[in-house]
Amino acid sequence: MERNVAALLLLLAAWTNPAAAQTAGPPLDATQTAGRNLFAQHCVVCHVKTLVTAVRTYGPSLSKESIGGLDDVLAAFISTGTSNMPGFKYSLEPGEIASIVAYLKTLPAPPAAPASPASR
């Protein structure tokens, strides 16, 4: 158990490093940094592939283009959740949700999936 906790902390420390999380573009401002930290605490387990052996994540990869890239829609989605994702309106303040949205707006869209060869 202690080894698992230590491994998770090392993973989060490496993942939340601005150089690791953002390879190009300006450095994160205070709001985006707070959002990155909240994302690491509340969202990373489902939206980031944390194990090398994992085939996929529970939730989709998130970026500035998630849900059309609309700040209000992203905030409402994070707040209320869905049947597959918990809502965070009771555990996060509106300003904290806004900081997560600000952080997501710094993430580039994932590359498009390669087209599968047509069946013959």
Image (tube, rainbow, N blue to C red):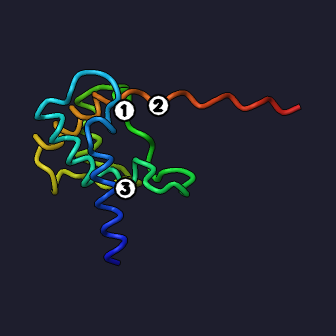
User: Given the image, on which type of amino acid does mark 3 rest?
Assistant: Val
Res 120 label: none
User: How many residues crowd mark 2 within 10 Å: few (<14), some (14–19), many (20+)?
Assistant: few
Q: CA distance from mark 1 to mark 3?
A: 16 Å
Q: Is residue 67 above or below residue 37?
A: above
Looking at the image, the residue that sits furthest to the right is: 120
Question: What residue did someone put label 1 on?
Answer: 63
Say whether residue 53 is left or right of residue 23: right
Question: What residue did someone put label 2 on?
Answer: 110
* Circle 2 SS class: loop
User: How many residues crowd mark 1 within 10 Å: few (<14), some (14–19), many (20+)?
Assistant: some
* Circle 3 SS class: helix
Q: Earlier in the sequence, mark 3 or mark 2?
A: 3
On the image, the x and y values in percent for residue 21 come to: 32, 37
Say whether residue 11 is left or right of residue 115: left
Quadrant hosting residue 73: top left
User: Given the image, on which type of amino acid does mark 2 rest?
Assistant: Pro
Q: CA distance from mark 3 to mark 2?
A: 18 Å
Q: Residue at x 24, y 39 (%)?
A: 76
On the image, the x and y values in percent for residue 101 come to: 23, 35
Dot 1 and dot 3 residues touching (CB under 8 Å)? no
Dot 2 and dot 1 residues touching (CB under 8 Å)? yes
Res 45 label: 3
